[in-house]
Amino acid sequence: MRREQELKEQFEKQQIVDVYIHYDGPRAYSFFTPDQGFYFAFNLEQYDEKSEWLYIPTNNFRMVQLLSRAETITDFILKSNAGYIVEIDQAGSITNMQEGFAEDKLPAASVYLKTDDDYMTFYLTGEKVSPFTMSESDFTTTLTNLRNGTLKAMKALQGFLPSSFQSPSSQIFGTPLYAPGSLKMVVKVESDKDLLKATLAVASDQIEAGMTLDQSQVDEVKNNFYFAAPPLRSRPDFSYDTVTITSNLMASQAFKLELNQDHKRKHLDYVKKGQKSDDMVILTGKVVRAAHDKCSFTIQNTEIIECLLDPNNTELINELTASKAELQNCETPEDIVTELLDLKCNVKVAGILSTSGSTKILKLTSALVVP
Amino acid sequence: MSGVQNSTLKLICDHLTDCPHKSSVSKNQDYFRVMKDGVIKKENFIGTAYLPSAVKNKTPENCETCAVSINPTPADAQNLIQVIPAFRRGTIIKLEIKIDHGRIHDNTTYHANWWHPQGFDPTTIARSHP
C-alpha cells in the first residue's frame, strides 16, 4: 500500500522525455519520475473529466526496440514485468491506480508504433545511463569510450578551462565537463546521415567558443573524441545510427557531440593510418597468446597485435587487474599475462602502435578486460 | 493546393506571441481528423489547452496546445485509431479547409496543427468520410 502511494506520487511528478504520438496532446510518450523511474505512457481512454493511461516501466533499450519497430506495441507492453493502469482527473491527480496491462484495450497484435520523430532521448544521470545501466551492450561500450575520450580531452584541456568547470558539484563521468542533470543523449534510428565531420566541427567550435586554445589543443580534443567511436569489432544488437549528446558546459554554452555507426569505418581508416606511423590507437580483441619474458600478450583484432605491458606502470597494472576479479589474485605482471591467456578474455587496449617487421606492437597505456 | 499567408484572420491563438509558427500557412487543402467519440460537434475542435480534460495537465497553454490536430491523409487518421486505444472507437471526418480557415503547420508527415479563426465553426467544413 505504501509502495502504491509512493508510485502515485512519483507518477504525478512525471517529466515527459519524448512524445511519440501527439494528437490534441501527447498520447504515447516516455517520462521520468523524480526517483529516476523511466516509463512508457499510453493513452487508454479519454473523457472530458478524466483520462486513463497505461504506464509501462521501460528502459532505453526497450524503447529502441519499440521505436525501431522491432517489436509491436502490444508485444512491447505484454513483455514488460509490470504495468500500471492509472486514472487521472482534471487537476492531474491520480484518482485510481491498479496493476495490469489492459489487454482488452491494447492495439491489434500486428500494430507498430509509427512515428516520424525517429529519435529517442537518453538522459544520463551520475555515471549511469538512466534509468538502468546496460552493461552488456555496445551502447555502453560507446559510452565508456566516450567517457575515456572525454577524460583524455579534459586532461588535454587542463589549465585552459574556465574556473567554473572546476566546481566539484558539476561532475558527471568523473569530469567537470557537464552540469548536473544537463546531459542529454539522443539516438536517431535508421538515418543514413553522416554527421561525424559536422559533429567534430560543432564540438570543437563549441569548445573554442568558450575558451582560448592553441590549435594543437583543439586537435587533441578532436582526436580524443574520435576515440569515442565504438570499437572496431563491436556488433550493435540494435539499430541506431546517430548518438547525439548535448549538455551545458556552462549556463551560456552548449556542448554537442554526435556519433554514428559510420565511425567504425572511419575509425578503421584512422587506425590504418596510425599503423603507418606510430600513433595512439584503441582496440578491442581476444587474447590469443602470452609471453612471460616480454611481459606481453597478443590479441586478435582485425589483425594480430602484440601488446606490451610495462611492469613498472602501476596505474596500468591496477586498471587491468581491477577490471576482472580473477586477475586480482595475480602477484606479478607476468602472472597477469598468463591469466589473461587462460581466461581467453576480450580486452580493450590503448597505446602507441608501431610496426616491427610484420609484427604490430602496441605499447600499452591502458588496458581493460571487457565482456 | 496553394500556400499563402493570411494575416488578417483573428485566430484562436492570437493572444500568444509568435503564434502560429512562422512556417504555418493558409491553404486550400483537404485534411482529416479523428472524432474520438464518432460525433461531429464543435466541442471536438477545441485545442488541448482549452479542454476540460486531464490531457491539458500535460500540455500547458502554448502555441501547439491551442491548435487542433489534423491528418494529411485518411490513412494517417486510421493509423491513430489503430494505435491509440483512446481513439479506437473514433471515426474519420474530412475537413475541406480553405485559405480563410486559419493556419496550418505540417509538423510531421502524418500530423499537422491547425489554428482556426476565432468564432469559426469547424463543423461547417466537416464531412463524413466513408
Image: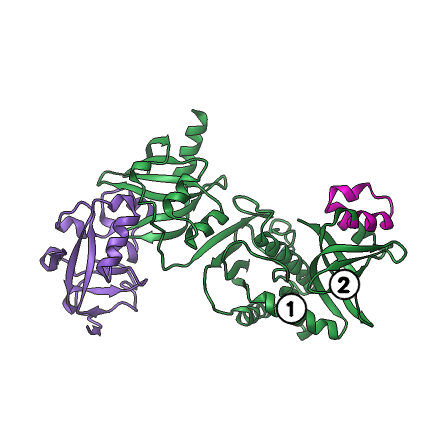
Q: Amino acid at mark 2?
A: Ile
Q: Does A314 lie within the magenta span?
A: no
**Image coordinates for residue B89, horizontal then vertical, percent:** 21, 44
In the rendered structure, the answer to whether residue B7 lies left or right of residue A160 reads: left
Which residue is at 87% across, 55% downward?
Answer: A312
Task: Give the residue displayed 45% in from the left and 64% down from the top.
Answer: A191
* Residue that mark 1 sits on: A268
Q: Is residue A131 above or below residue B127?
A: above
Q: Is residue B108 left or right of residue A331?
A: left
At mark 2, the secondary structure is strand
The colour chain B appears in is purple
Instruction: Classify mark 2: residues with Cα within 10 Å, few (<14), some (14-19) or many (20+).
Output: many
Q: Earlier in the sequence, mark 2 or mark 1?
A: 1
Q: Amino acid at mark 1?
A: Leu
**Position of residue A145 measured from the top left corner of the image (x, y, whole percent):** 64, 57
Chain letter for mark 1: A
Q: Nearer the viewer, residue B24 or A271?
A: A271
Per the model, the C-alpha gap separating discs 2 and 1 is 15 Å
Q: Which residues are magenta?
A: A319-341
Q: Quadrant of residue A326?
A: top right
Whether the magenta-drawn stretch holds residue A335 is answered as yes
Q: Do the residues bearing badges 2 and 1 touch, measured as CB atoms within 8 Å?
A: no
As drawn, the label of residue A305 is: 2
* Residue at 78% over, 47% down: A342
Chain ID, mark 2: A
Q: Nearer the viewer, mark 2 or mark 1?
A: 2
Q: Quarter of the image holding residue A281?
A: bottom right
Q: Residue furthest top?
A: A1
Residue at 53 percent of width and 71 percent of height: A198
Which tint is chain A? green
